[in-house]
Image (cartoon, grey):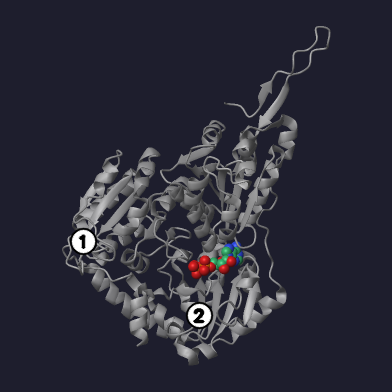
Amino acid sequence: MSSVLESKPAAAPAADAPKAKPQETIDGFHLVIEALKLNGLDTIYGLPGIPITDLTRMAQAEGLRVISFRHEQHAGNAAAAAGFLTGKPGICLTVSAPGFLNGLTALANATTNCFPMILISGSSEREIVDLQQGDYEEMDQLAVAKPLCKAAFRVLHAEDIGVGIARAIRAAVSGRPGGVYLDLPAKLFAQTMEAEAGKRSLIEVVDPAPRQIPAPESVQRALDLLKGAKKPLILLGKGAAYAQADADIRAFVEKTGIPYLPMSMAKGLLPDTHDQSASAARSYVLQEADVVVLVGARLNWLLSHGKGKTWGGPEKGAARQFIQIDIAPTEIDSNVAIAAPVIGDIGSCVAALVAGLGSNWQKPPSDWTGAIADKKDKNLTKMAETLAKRPSPMSFQSALSVVRDMVKARPDAIVVNEGANTLDFARSIVDMYEPRKRLDVGTWGIMGIGMGFSVAAAVTTGKPVIAIEGDSAFGFSGMEVETICRYDLPVCVIVFNNNGVYRGTDKNASGGADVAPTVFVKNARYDKLMEAFGGVGVHATTADELDRALKEAVASGKPTLINAVIDETAGTESGRITSLNPQTAAAKKQ
Ligand code: ADP
């Protein structure tokens, strides 16, 4: 079907009756498509099947970009990453029950990370589902989705499609962004209505994420606190990256002169090489800071809940005060007391703080900034020594030093990163220079985002994507290399292959024939996987080989997978979060 409007001849007129105009109608399929287009949502990440196959075909025919995946979880992850990168909800489209459930992991993850996305799933007939009469792929999807997302809606009538999509968009992007579920039963798609009335029923959402201006007294309270600080610190989170208030954030950091620490997905908001970056003195500044300004960052497990040893112990903790800028008022005091909450959108809040600094603002004491600079120098010198080494087989560090140089040369490239050790090392070794160029495992520390995020990054930006993948992490979404090849996306996947989860040397304690649960097939050739679909596969055993292959991949834009052979004895159990393993935690307590 190529047109939105379908002409249906009216019933045969009587011979003497005046000729009636054929009635123009629009069906549910096209109402969904038109509602998306009207709101500038031009890409669908999904996987066709009953009852939405025709919807994907018609959407493509009507000019939407439809990116088909091999598994819904990765389509969902792509939608979530697209949401983070663009500020518009990413759209994921799935079939009913199992397809919906596969997409749900991504929806829950998007909600956890505050990324806006809409999961649209076809579903079985309400009448049969509610009487539990055993429909094809029967499931009460709305009820299942509700606790796992920010909002969930179902549309039963064609004339409500416009409202359903408008509500989904608003729920996804306003306030704290998140995932929204939209349930569309199979019967809805074939419903028709008069075309003009159909068009009138659609809603173009006005100002979907309105600015939220902070209360002036909250800004003043924050400024008063900041003025008295001896060791202030700014902590930038991925909410700050999402907010696209890059110039205001830069002005706030530079005008105050306060050292800052980016959370992993906030890296690049200011270049990691910025003088005020305290990344290379992270432990020191967290322990010592007396006033901490949280900008779009939650005091969750990633920040040790704002207390304990990471923050210098109870004494320092008692003396420290927090300013927290966030759009969600209920986030405040979630872990420790917040002395000065500033509630609003980050752009407005940060701009108000900058405006309130005044002309006689005093930059932080030089003994604080000087001590940080000393720590940084020492740590960076140590790191440079490690990165200069060229061991054989490669270490995580020697392989990552190659990626570090590449990103320095191409700061517009997007880095996707997942794994355990591969994640930890890459986060600290690979400097970022531009905002929203780093996508990673996020708030849950989840595995499986790799290829979905890579596809979305390439589709939404057209820039080169470098996916830094642990061999275990890659396995979760590896089949999507076919998707990458099919759409000929400029994605270079580097699999850090050390033969297993964490490392490849564990032994089966029973002495039995099975390998240990953490061990994979030795010397696997992941590069062949990319070759199978027409992409470029490279087997790299040295840093030089890796360097050549990566440069070639970024220059050519061809789908590439580099199997980077890493020392199989390298790697720590669970990387830097080994303490979260129950056994390690218990041993520590004893
Ligand atoms: P990180 O993991 O990088 O520390 P989090 O995901 O924990 O970051 O925190 C992001 C925070 O940013 C959330 O509390 C969210 O409510 C907030 N946030 C997201 N978008 C905005 C925005 N536009 N304005 C203000 N706060 C925002």
Location of the C terminus by quadrant is bottom left
Separation of marks 1 and 2 at Cα, in angstroms: 40 Å
Q: Nearer the viewer, residue 514 or 146?
A: 514
Near mark 2 (Cα within 10 A), the count class, few <14, some 14-19 or many ≥20, is many
Circle 2 sits in a helix, a strand or a loop, which is it? helix
Count of numbered circles in the view = 2
Kind of residue sitting beneath label 2: Gly
Looking at the picture, how far across and down is residue 43, in whole percent? 53, 42
* Above or below 205: residue 215: below
Q: Which residue is mark 2?
A: 306
Of the four image quadrants, the one with ligand 1 is: bottom right
Q: Nearer the viewer, residue 50 or 498?
A: 50
- Residue at image position (57%, 61%) is 243
Looking at the picture, how far across and down is residue 389, in whole percent? 20, 68
Q: Nearer the viewer, mark 1 or mark 2?
A: 1
Q: Which residue is mark 1?
A: 515
Q: Nearer the viewer, residue 96 or 326?
A: 96
- Residue at image position (54%, 37%) is 51
Confirm or deny contact between disc 1 and disc 2 (CB under 8 A): no
Kind of residue sitting beneath label 1: Val
**Is 450 displayed left or right of 160 in the figure?**
left
